Image: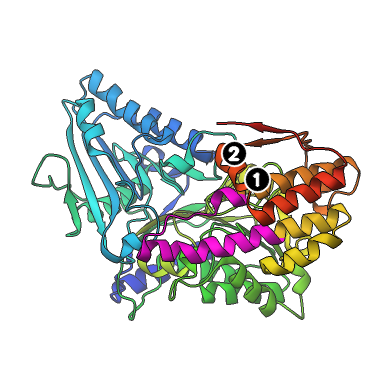
Amino acid sequence: MDLLKNIHETLVNEKNQGSPQIEACDLFNLGLDGLEGTFIENNPLIRAQEIFTRARELIQSAQSEVLISLYKFQSDSDGALEIMRGLQFLSENRRQVKVRVVVNKKSGPATLVGSSRKRPPIDYQEFQRQDLEPFDINIADHKHKFVNSNHSKVIVVDGKVAIVMSGDPSLKNNFTEDAWMEIGSIVHGGVVQSIRNHFVTLWSAENVSLNHGVTDKVMLQQANIKKHYYRGGDGILYLGKSRSSDMLKRYASPYKIALLMLLEQASESVNLMCNNINDPDIINALAACVHRGVVVKVLVGRYHGETAESIPLAGGSNLKSLQKLMALSEGNGQENLLVHWACDKKGHLTQNMGAGTIHAKLVLVDSEYILTGSSLPDLQSCYHSRESDLLIRSKEHAQIYHDTIFYPVLNISISQDNYADVQIVSREQIKRSLPHARDQNTILMLIENYINMRERERRFYKFRRIFRGSSYDRTSKISAAIKLKMLVESDMRQSGQAPSFQEQLLYEWEIQDLEMTSSELKALQDGLLKSLYLAVNQLRGEEIKISRIQ
């Protein structure tokens, strides 16, 4: 049985039967047919700096056309500046290049979640200031009123080479040491025409309107894809999904169909990395793999998207979804399930959208199949957002993706077996326990309780701020508590009392004092946080040194 061919045939049948979600599902052999063939570059791009530096290089090589689809484009982000440098290079060299850019723009109910109300997704004036002549350049908004966002992240150059990405050029995704984990895959040849045609369909959509000094969209023509008979073996299947705002009549995305078929046939291993997971069918399929003896490793952010995913009909948080997976996996084969929470480089659980966030979307099955792109195994991606993904069959590339992306992040993560969720307790409970805290473990537990309590308050009051306009925020209190927690953990490590999971890290750290911002120093005056700070002082037997930073 050729699983890749079966998936392709299933998608084609679904499309022919009228599924509106499947816009592209073209299958190609890897490395066949000479110049007409398809291949993927050996080294996947990791994190924003690699992705958008390479994007600039590809844009600079353009001879006729650059097509860009993004969820966000924040013009002062490092990634956006790289893209602008690429376009400026073309302008300075007077190349007659056609440029089309589509960026998602929230409106209506969609603005209640996220930060789109604070700033536009793209700064059109920045493009106008660049004076990018002699470009035939059009920049358009994809109107996103409810759940029908454009989440596709691709850059296509000359119809010959494309990057399929997991992330956008945004300020939270800048080129820093603690940058988010992202994936970019570069493909060449026939499959690029399929990606290009998917973009053309987006460009022609009614809810895509220009916003760059012109009134008429210059339409693009679909390419005639040269069909090759799939000969079996290594191949690549492009999965292009349409958007949908229908909450009642749902059609599964090509990503979900492909993933469920992969999981059904998995016999050895499933490695899944993403920022959010909550699709119940996928969770059930993962549990079925566990009971069949397949080793399933799931690597996600513990707190990622908790507020947005907890909205009714959104699907639920990562914690609730993986608790369900663990419950379904109990019994025969439950030892085959390994749940890991993402950590930053110092071994601390990543916070929502914080340092070290996993934003990469990657599934590796039986060390042979790779599923990567913009889709997540959650309800939003599987039913509503417009997405772009690649399904690759190649043992060689699967090993590369495992060794360069999945394993390094897994290696500094915290296993669920070594991490017990701290019960969210009240201020009163923490106060009552504090006088009895006479060792580092107890102090550490109370600080973690405090962080969880404040996180819960912040998630709840975020919605109150939306509707009542309250500006009170608990972010500084949480960040100050996290730094205090890191200091205690550093003391424990030096005294040989570190929690067992830290022994798995490849590096050590020591913290001699606390570096605090002005807002964090002010937060230390919070009654309960100040009591925790004084308790740590007393336990250490000396005053904690604090230095102010900007």
Instruction: Give the overall secondary structure of the magenta segment.
Output: helix
- Image quarter of residue 336: bottom right
Residue 344, numbered label: 1
For residue 357, above or below residue 15? above
Q: Residue at x 42, y 71 (%)?
A: 10
The residue drawn where x is 91% and y is 43% is 495
The x, y position of residue 52, in whole percent, is 43, 35
Tell me which label, 2 or 1, sits earlier in the chain. 2
User: How far apart in space, not on screen, are marks 2 and 1 (Cα)?
Assistant: 7 Å
Q: Depth check: give the residue in front, 210 or 229.
A: 210
> Quick one: label 1, few (<14), some, or many (20+) residues within 10 Å?
many
Of helix, strand and loop, which one carries label 1?
A: loop
Which residue has dot 2 on it?
A: 178
Dot 1 amino acid type: Asp
Whether tag 2 and tag 1 are in contact, CB under 8 A, the answer is yes
Mark seen at residue 323: none
Q: Quadrant of residue 207?
A: bottom left
User: Which residues fall within the magenta stretch?
Assistant: 449-478
Looking at the image, residue 288 lies above or below residue 96:
below
Question: Height in image: 166 above or below 91?
Answer: below
In the foreground, 412 or 502? 502
Q: Percent position (x, y) of residue 376?
A: 48, 61
Indicate the colouring scheme.
rainbow
